[in-house]
Image (spheres, rainbow, N blue to C red):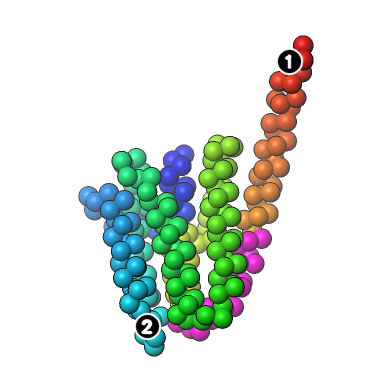
Amino acid sequence: MNALRTYRDDGLIADWIGATAGRALRVGEAPLTLLGAAILAVALGTAERPLSELVLAVAVGVVVVVVGAGARRSHTGRFAWTVPPLLRLLEYAFLIRLTVLADPDAMPLCFALLCALAFHHYDTVYRLRQQGVAPPAWTRFIGGGWEGRLVVFSLLAALDLLAPGMLVAAVVLGAVYVTESVRSWMHFARATRPAVIDDEEAEDE
């Protein structure tokens, strides 16, 4: 298990791009991610209505291809550790800016969605650190990966469905991530409790 690959939170789209187009590129994943972040930053900074959703949708398509090309790398490069935080910044900034442009009234829903995502990413870090296991693959598929969420919310914004889409995503993802996390930590606690008790008894003797 490669922790950095888990931290990336790639979905099926990025996996497919990394397995196909990514093999032909000699560029490392960190430069690819920086390039993708720069492209999206320019799009976020220059997009204005009435073409903002179109501009961002095109930018998202380019970013998904560029950054997704690094999804299947070894994740052992000198700067590979910078990729997961860059992806978090890229995704969170995109969702906030998209909401500001497409539907400012949906900002509370945007922050609810960000809370669900932040919980999942934070839980993933500590689960790998404490339990030595990653969240099950099905949670990654349900979440869509960072690239899937960018694509879906770009389309929802273009269809003027951003607010209901964020509401559904926040509720569903929040419920899935929290429920699965609680189950995992309860299982871990039960599995390690006997060892803790034995250690305490040994110290008393």
Q: Is residue 132 left or right of residue 191?
A: left
Circle on res. 202: 1
| Mark 2, secondary structure of its residue | loop
Of callouts 2 and 1, which one flags the residue occurring earlier in the amino acid sequence?
A: 2
Residue 36 occupies quadrant: bottom left
Dominant SS in magenta: helix
- What residue appears at the point 67 percent right and 38 percent down from the top-left corner? 188
Asked if the magenta segment contains residue 8, the reply would be no
Other residues around mark 2 within 10 Å, as few (<14) / some (14–19) / many (≥20): some
Asked if the magenta segment contains residue 168, the reply would be yes
Asked if residue 61 can be seen in this view, the reply is no
Of tags 2 and 1, the one toward the viewer is 2
Amino acid type for the residue under numbered disc 1: Ala
Which residue is disc 2 drawn over? Answer: 48
Most extreme residue toward the top is: 205
Q: Cα distance, mark 2 to mark 1?
A: 67 Å
- What residue appears at the point 59 percent right and 78 percent down from the top-left corner? 164
Other residues around mark 1 within 10 Å, as few (<14) / some (14–19) / many (≥20): few
